[in-house]
Amino acid sequence: MACQRGQDVANFVSEGKKIIGVALNYMCAVKAKNVPVPTVPIVFIKPTTSYLKEGRPIILPKVFTKVAYEVELGVVIGTRCKNVSKEKAMGYVGGYCLALDLTAQCNLTAARATGGSWTLGKGFDTATPVSRFIPLDAVDDPHALPLWLKVNGEVKQKGCTADLVFKVPDIISYVSKYMTLEPNDLILTGTPHGSEPFKAGDLIECGLADLATMKFDVCDEQNL
């Protein structure tokens, strides 16, 4: 079936059914961690209740002791697809966004050690701050976009999507072998090296080329 790129997916935050994340997907991060390069995408799912729009604070759950930032390119699916080839995968992209994949490292460290799920450490409320929708025609090449993140004005992450281990069509093709991708679904493509914990009172700013920027205050759950 031909891709209908004209479908409106600008309201992906309210209309989307799932968020798909990819871990360890930047070569700079692989090298920094001194681990093998993944042979297939490392995929996880986040609930859409984790979305956060600019203007509201990031809330650190009181059950976690160490939450880290991860700045990422988000890819919004434009057309329903299943078993898509890499060659045709980009035809199903509806647009993009700037995103943060907030991660409770305290939870994931324990989960990795026991073979447990990443769901709680990745899917808590406000764990997926996102920018406005970036139209498809605003991005010439999704694999040539600089990313940056600052905490309290200090640069903490700086990278480029050219460093992705698995490119956008690789991810779409791989995931679509296992589950149907639907309009407004979001794929988080991974984060460059430099992810570190942050705390209440911090100000997080990030950007994607000249396409989008975001700014979020951080607070503790118990202080609300």
Image (spheres, helix red, strand yellow):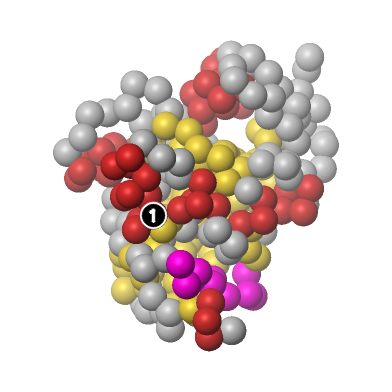
Residue 82 image offset from top left, x and y in percent: 68, 18
Please report the residue visible at 49 percent of the width from the left and 24 percent of the height from the top. 170
Please report the residue visible at 33 percent of the width from the left and 49 percent of the height from the top. 110
Left or right: 34 in relation to 78: left
Residue range (magenta):
54-63
Left or right: 134 in relation to 161: right
Q: Is residue 73 magenta?
A: no
- Mark 1, residue position: 107
Residue 174 image offset from top left, x and y in percent: 52, 21
53 to 163, vertically: above or below: below
Q: Where, by quadrant of the figure, is residue 25 drawn?
A: top left
Q: Within 10 Å of the Cα at label 1, are there few (<14), some (14-19), or many (20+) other Cα atoms?
A: many
Query: Which quarter of the image is occupied by the N terminus?
Result: top right
154 to 37, vertically: above or below: below
Q: Where, by quadrant of the figure, is residue 163 drawn?
A: top left
Please report the residue visible at 39 percent of the width from the left and 54 percent of the height from the top. 107
- Res. 160 visible in picture: no
Count of numbered tags = 1
Q: Is residue 56 magenta?
A: yes
Farthest residue, direction front: 114
Left or right: 98 in relation to 106: right
169 to 7, vertically: above or below: above
> Could you say which is closer to the camera, residue 201 or residue 88?
201
Please report the residue visible at 29 percent of the width from the left and 42 percent of the height from the top. 113
Q: Secondary structure at mark 1?
A: helix
> Could you say which is closer to the camera, residue 145 or residue 28?
28
Residue 86 image offset from top left, x and y in percent: 54, 17
The three-letter amino acid code for the residue at tag 1 is: Asn
Query: Which quarter of the image is occupied by the C terminus?
Result: bottom right
- Prevailing secondary structure class for the magenta stretch in the rendered image: loop
